[in-house]
Image: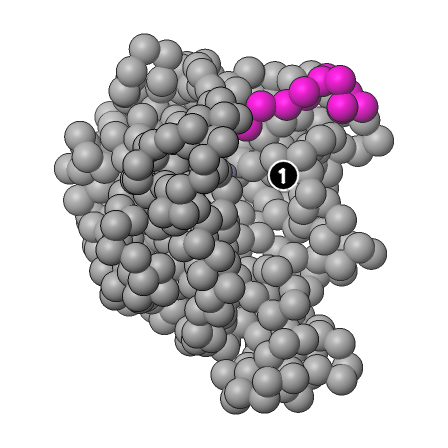
């Protein structure tokens, strides 16, 4: 058992490095780039998804390599794939999850066909390049590399490609957790999308961002009812009037500022990267926000504002479909996003108080229980070691996500899930996610593959078979 005892010791890192060196990395990197190009060519636009295309793509890759996989079709055409390298059980398993669906892409606004997978000036083009097909490639390559090198694993390494993330995950991660939870019985960690290596526009790494907590959606519909009538004779108490009055109170409501530990930590970790006049304040954001002037300036930025409070966006309104008819009902939808530790019922009580009109009904459209993942997981030890080697001085930190990913399905069941894909993304490239001209550099695919392999090897306690055991294995084969 000595090979597991010294997991983080220098000796074990050296053993790991030696075995990784035996792999033909230039060939593996070429393979990863080719795989990315072919994967980007599969149209898995959701809706309708057609993720079976992705599931079959990986099934065939794993089959050729001699790795067993299972495909689960949650609804016609909606594929999910699970493949596993089995460890000796001395460590929990590592689940590598990515979603195979992509959001729609309109070729009229792209410089290259969104499903061409074309290589242009050192970049591979395609919808999903950043969100999040490249991570599927780095995950698959990690299984292939570990398998080919004959590494002995402490924990299982699981590849999980899921459907439907872009529409909420009901047919993907939600389905897998609901219907096949036994597959994740030994899971110690799930690595998913949601964070990456943030770089400035010159391509210099600023921080490694690991998403451990995300705002939770709490989508609501407000319904006002009242006497209908003819538009020529206004009714003070009509449904639309009452609804609009309630919405006026809601939109004027300033929800309280609250700085979660993840947010406090993120701004402290990255303070040195902030504007010079704000650096001192960012080191202790909670204290700085007590100053109303600083708070006003900080929250004037929509993203920063969303990081420190529950937010409500009025997104949809409906009433009469005739100009001269006062309708009996009027409704509005609110995209509410709660801080990750917010009790939804408490928020709802506050909202009722703000609306101050008992006759307005509130329907819940979508709600997840609050869930975060711990920031002291051994993943952070592993990432800090790798980051220090690859990008000395660049912090590993925990930005709060304002959107949501499939991680909540696992977090709700007590399995730590982290958003981190080790690709370097410049600020100017972020808009390609769900935007036009999505693409990824070949350098990024290559280094992302290497770093993913390093992370997973360490988490799963991968060790090269030592010559003595190798000989024993050979003898047994005879
Ligand atoms: Zn995504």
Q: Nearer the viewer, residue 244 or 270?
A: 244
Please tell me in which quadrant of the rendered image residue 209 appears: bottom right
Q: For this view, does 73 lie left or right of residue 64?
A: left
**x, y percent for residue 190:** 35, 48
Q: Quadrant of the N terminus?
A: bottom left
Q: For this view, does 291 lie left or right of residue 441?
A: left
Region rendered in magenta = 99-114
**x, y percent for residue 179:** 17, 30
Q: Residue furthest front?
A: 233
Please tell me in which quadrant of the rendered image residue 34 appears: top right
**Is 353 a magenta residue?**
no
Q: Residue at x 25, y 63 (%)?
A: 349
Residue 198, can we see it? Answer: yes
Q: Residue at x 41, y 54 (%)?
A: 246
Residue 362 lies, with reference to residue 284, above or below; the image says: above
**x, y percent for residue 346:** 25, 65
Residue 353 lies, with reference to residue 73, above or below; the image says: below
Mark 1 close to ligand 1, CB under 8 Å: yes
Q: Nearer the viewer, residue 464 or 323?
A: 323
**Is 110 a magenta residue?**
yes
Q: Residue at x 72, y 45 (%)?
A: 429
**Magenta stretch mostly in which secondary structure?**
loop
Q: Residue at x 40, y 42 (%)?
A: 235
Please tell me in which quadrant of the rendered image residue 3 appears: bottom left
Judging by the rendered image, the residue that carries numbered circle 1 is 433
**x, y percent for residue 404:** 43, 47
């Amino acid at each position: 058992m000595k090979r597991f005892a010294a997991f983080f010791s220098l000796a074990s890192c050296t053993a790991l490095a030696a075995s990784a060196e035996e792999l033909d990395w230039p060939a593996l990197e070429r393979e990863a780039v080719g795989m990315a190009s072919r994967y980007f060519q599969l149209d898995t636009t959701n809706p309708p998804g057609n993720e079976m295309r992705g599931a079959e793509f990986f099934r065939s890759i794993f089959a050729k390599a001699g790795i067993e996989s299972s495909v689960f079709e949650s609804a016609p055409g909606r594929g999910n794939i699970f493949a596993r390298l089995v460890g000796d059980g001395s460590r929990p398993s590592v689940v590598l999850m990515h979603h195979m669906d992509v959001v729609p892409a309109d070729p009229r606004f792209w410089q290259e066909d969104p499903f061409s997978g074309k290589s242009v000036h050192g970049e591979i083009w395609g919808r999903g390049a950043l969100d999040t097909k490249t991570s599927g490639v780095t995950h698959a390559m990690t299984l292939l590399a570990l398998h080919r090198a004959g590494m002995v694993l402490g924990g299982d390494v699981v590849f999980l490609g899921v459907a439907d993330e872009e529409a909420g995950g009901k047919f993907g991660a939600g389905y897998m957790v609901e219907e096949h939870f036994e597959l994740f019985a030994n899971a110690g960690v799930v690595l998913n999308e949601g964070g990456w290596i943030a770089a400035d526009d010159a391509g210099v790494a600023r921080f490694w961002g690991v998403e451990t907590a995300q705002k939770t959606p709490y989508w609501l519909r407000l319904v006002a009812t009242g006497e209908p009538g003819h538009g020529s004779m206004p009714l003070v108490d009509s449904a639309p009037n009452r609804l609009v009055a309630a919405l006026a109170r809601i939109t004027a409501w300033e929800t309280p500022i609250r700085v979660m530990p993840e947010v406090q930590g993120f701004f402290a970790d990255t303070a040195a990267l902030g504007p010079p006049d704000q650096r001192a304040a960012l080191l202790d954001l909670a204290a700085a926000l007590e100053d109303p002037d600083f708070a006003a300036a900080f929250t004037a930025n929509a993203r920063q504002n969303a990081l420190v409070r529950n937010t409500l966006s009025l997104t949809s309104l409906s009433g009469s479909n005739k100009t001269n008819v006062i309708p009996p009902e009027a409704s509005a939808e609110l995209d509410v996003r709660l801080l990750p530790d917010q009790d939804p019922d408490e928020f709802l009580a506050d909202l009722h108080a703000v609306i101050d009109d008992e006759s307005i009904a509130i329907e819940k459209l979508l709600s997840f229980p609050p869930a975060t993942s711990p920031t002291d997981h051994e993943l952070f030890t592993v990432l800090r070691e790798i980051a220090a080697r690859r990008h000395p001085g660049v912090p590993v930190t925990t930005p709060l996500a304002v959107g949501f990913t499939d991680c909540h399905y696992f977090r709700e069941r007590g399995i730590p899930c982290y958003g981190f894909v080790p690709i370097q993304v410049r600020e100017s490239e972020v808009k390609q996610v769900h935007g036009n001209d999505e693409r990824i550099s070949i350098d990024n695919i290559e280094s992302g593959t290497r770093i993913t392999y390093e992370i997973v090897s360490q988490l799963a306690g991968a060790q090269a078979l030592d010559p003595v055991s190798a000989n024993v294995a050979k003898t047994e084969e005879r």
